[in-house]
Amino acid sequence: NEIILPDILHSTKGLRINTICEGVETAAQCRYLVSIGCQDVQGYYFSKPIPPDQFYARYDELNGCYPLSFIEP
């Protein structure tokens, strides 16, 4: 993954394709993805699957973005 992911992200950015990395389970994975330029991630690290009403309430509460400032280096 560490060899191919940066190239994939570079290619998708060049093609102006938005890319979401799924399956993020740890802060280390999230830090790595952010460090190689991935701007959109999702996975159990942020939340387990939740019913739609809880999702929309949380989405509104967070203004559509989960802040990454809590990620320690």
Image (spheres, rainbow, N blue to C red):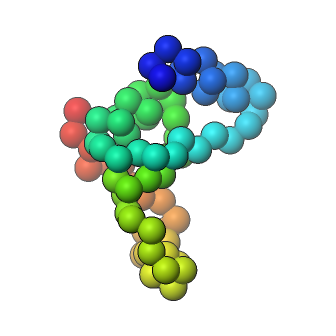
Query: Residue 7 at x, y = what percent?
Result: 60, 18
Q: Which residue shows up at 45% across the image and 19% down it?
A: 2
Placement of 17 over or under 10, stated as above or below: below
Placement of 59 over or under 17, stated as above or below: below
Mark count:
0
Query: Residue 27 at x, y = what percent?
Result: 29, 42
Who is closer to the viewer here, 43 or 57? 43
In which quadrant of the rendered view does residue 31 lie?
top left
Who is closer to the viewer here, 65 or 19? 19
Q: Which residue shows up at 35% across the image and 47% down it?
A: 25
Placement of 18 over or under 64, stated as above or below: above
In which quadrant of the rendered view does residue 4 lie?
top right
Query: Residue 9 at x, y = what percent?
Result: 61, 27
Query: Residue 36 at x, y = what percent?
Result: 47, 25
Residue at the farthest left position: 72
In which quadrant of the rendered view does residue 34 lie?
top left
In the rendered image, the quadrant that contains the C terminus is top left
Horizontal side of residue 17 vs 1, given as left or right: right
Q: Which residue shows up at 30% across the image and 44% down it?
A: 26
Residue at the farthest top position: 3
Q: Which residue shows up at 63% across the image and 40% down it?
A: 19
Placement of 39 over or under 5, stated as above or below: below
Residue at the farthest bottom position: 53
